[in-house]
Amino acid sequence: MSLFVGRVPFSKVVGLLDKTVRFEVKEMKVMLYPQVNTAGSGPSNVVFYLSAELKKHVQIFRYPSFHSSLQRASFGDYTAQLVNVWGAGLRHDFDIAHFMMLPELKDGSFPLALFTKVANLPLILNVHGIIHLEQSLLGTPFQRVLLKKVLTLALCKNASRIVVNSSWMFRKINEWYGVQPEKVVVIPNGINLQMFQSSPEKVTMEGDPCVLFVGSFIYPKGVDTLIKAIAIAKRDLPDIKLHVVGNSKYLLPSLRSLIAKEGVENNISFHGWVSQSELPRYYKSADFCVFPSRLESFGIVVLEAMASGTPIIASDIDTFRERLTEGSTALFFQNNKPGDLSRAILKLASDSNLRTQLSKNALEAIQMYNWSNIVLKYLEIYQNVSH
């Protein structure tokens, strides 16, 4: 599997970067925003593990998040914290500012970026995802336009380097914002291999086969396609059981209507939100995972399943193609086609040798996504922009 960071295969980058790089960046002072104290999901997961790895190589100064989903703060608290961080920035002689842009108006990246401009400080900007800018779930149309066309554009223009996690994101950020391609670097998200590979414990999950979906229930995740596919597969696999792990905040009522319509109430079990520490047990307990997304910026669940050695069926979309290889680390099905997905389910359920081979290959391929490897490319960026 070929993994690219910018235009250089990531496997070669890991081989080229050595202790010399680590020594040269050791004395750097990096202003890192936001501070995340526990591993969650999505962007917060990336920030938590990346900052932990960066601390091994550079001096990290972390600052609390103003992001409303991570820290509930009044406008007064938000303003006071902003002033405090600005003051800290003036007191410290930072070499680099590294901001993780998060998809809400209360994200402090934009006002803090003004400080970097005034201080003439190189800004590294991670853009974790831009799908949310196209979704009606995020505020009013005015707010979405403000985020998409004004705040995000201003941040991208001001950044010395922009880090995105997939080639799809690379194309979109250039298409939507007209950012200079040479400013954008593709670095995939990493995975905590130890957490997903060290625990042999399982949870009790029924089903023959036992199928797992992990993710939110928003439309781009394609859960409705999966439900329809389960209904079709049930004709040949009456004991099939789909176990759904994720936040049921958004579309659960409509999904329950679909489940009743398809007659698969007894074939689907909802487990709700599961903590990161508990999640590996669910992967270990499943016969295989299905990720039917219509659209993904990255899809960290794919890395989690690979790290757990759980065979994967995934929709044939660009971002999954970057992580997975057909017939080697996953089976693909045509996006948004329940019939094609049901055929993939039947194939994997009936072939234990194929499941074993997919698992073995995934466990080998996932090694390059260890955070200790991913951080090397960030250190290379630090080195380049600080000169």
Image (cartoon, rainbow, N blue to C red):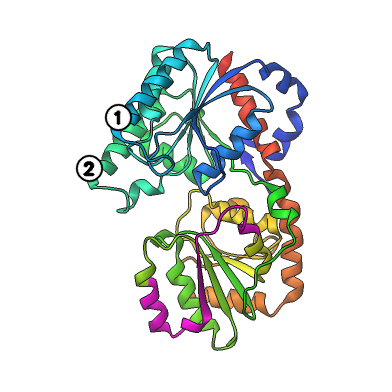
Q: Which mark is residue 3?
A: none
Q: Is residue 144 left or right of 288 when viewed as pictured? A: left
Q: Position of residue 338 (x, y in %)?
A: 48, 75
For the residue pair 18 and 16, the one nearer the viewer reads as: 18
Magenta range is: 255-280
Residue 145 belongs to magenta span? no
Q: Residue at x 65, y 58 (%)?
A: 280
Percent coordinates x, y for residue 354 in the rendering:
73, 71
Q: Amino acid at mark 1?
A: Gly
Q: Is residue 386 left or right of residue 144?
A: right
Q: Does residue 62 appear in this view?
A: yes
Is residue 166 visible to us here?
Answer: no
Residue in view at x 72 percent, y 39 percent = 11
Query: Does residue 251 sit above or below 26 in this rendering?
Result: below
Tell me where residue 324 appears, x and y as whole percent. Answer: 63, 56
Instruction: Say what secondary structure mark 2 lies in.
Output: helix
At 60% from the left and 66% from the top, the residue drawn is 289
Q: Nearer the viewer, residue 233 or 335?
A: 233
Query: Within 10 angstroms of label 2, few (less than 14), some, or many (20 or more) residues?
Result: few
Residue picked out by circle 2: 142
Residue 332, quarter of picture:
bottom right
- Horizontally, is 76 left or right of 249 in the view? left
Would you say 363 lies left or right of 80 here? right
Callout in the foreground (1, 2):
1
Q: Secondary structure at mark 1?
A: helix
- On-image quarter of the C terminus: top right
- Per the image, the residue denoted by label 1 is 76
Residue 64 coordinates in the image, percent (x, y): 46, 31
